Amino acid sequence: MAAMTHRTAALLDHVVPVRTPALSAAARAFLCAGGVLLLALLSQVRVPIGPVPVTGQTLGVLLVGAAFGAPLGLATVSLYLLLGAAGLPVFAGGEAGLAYAFGPTGGYLVGFALAAALLGRLAARGWDKGVLSCAAAMVLANVVVYVPGLLWLKLSLGLGWQATLAAGLAPFLLGDAVKLAIAAAALPAAWRLVGRQG
């Protein structure tokens, strides 16, 4: 494996610096499973407020996408979505199955995968190392979650745009700001810790 630089490597590539292909594959499989577990656990932090509940899922997506990097972050979130669609109770409130995956929240689930990939790419360019740049990356990731989420919510429920925004955006802004702040503080702090230990 080629040596990784601080500019192009994900945070976890510095925390788990495995060098041989076999160990790298095993470590990534383990990290992927751990990321799926984190997403599943955070999904159970749920406040039902309408057709789309407030959950901890987004925080998990932000952390996994930025810390794992684009390939592993996308793979982890995609595996989470596939397991949920296949019937494992990993979605918000222990929900599972294709009916839930294609229900009103389906667009947000697709947005999770897109956001993880985007965050991984931005983190590879160093956006996760400073609080302000990390916060900007998290804002962009949230936009990527909301665009397909709101479009699908509108289509699936047959709502107008005002009702869609009232049901699928406005109630989540405060919670998303809190989750964004947590992620934007945690990732640069983790990088500083890695730097001191390196």
Image (cartoon, grey):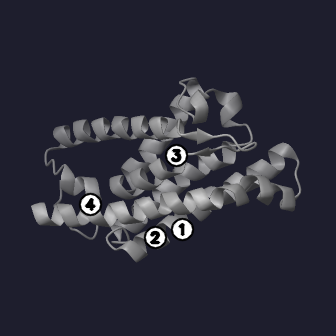
Residue designated by label 3: 56
The residue nearer to you, when weighing 182 against 5, is 182
Q: Circle 1 — which element?
A: helix
Q: Position of residue 125 (x, y in %)?
A: 35, 71
Q: CA distance from mark 4 to mark 3?
A: 20 Å
Q: Residue furthest top?
A: 87
- Disc 4 designates what residue? 190
Residue denoted by label 2: 135
Label pair 1/2, CB-CB below 8 angstroms: yes
Q: Quadrant of the C terminus?
A: bottom left
Can residue 72 be seen in this snapshot?
A: yes
Q: Position of residue 91 (x, y in %)?
A: 57, 34
The residue that disc 1 covers is 139
Task: Give, as a three-letter code, the residue at label 3.
Answer: Gly
Quadrant of res 86: top right
Question: Quarter of the image holding residue 126?
Answer: bottom left
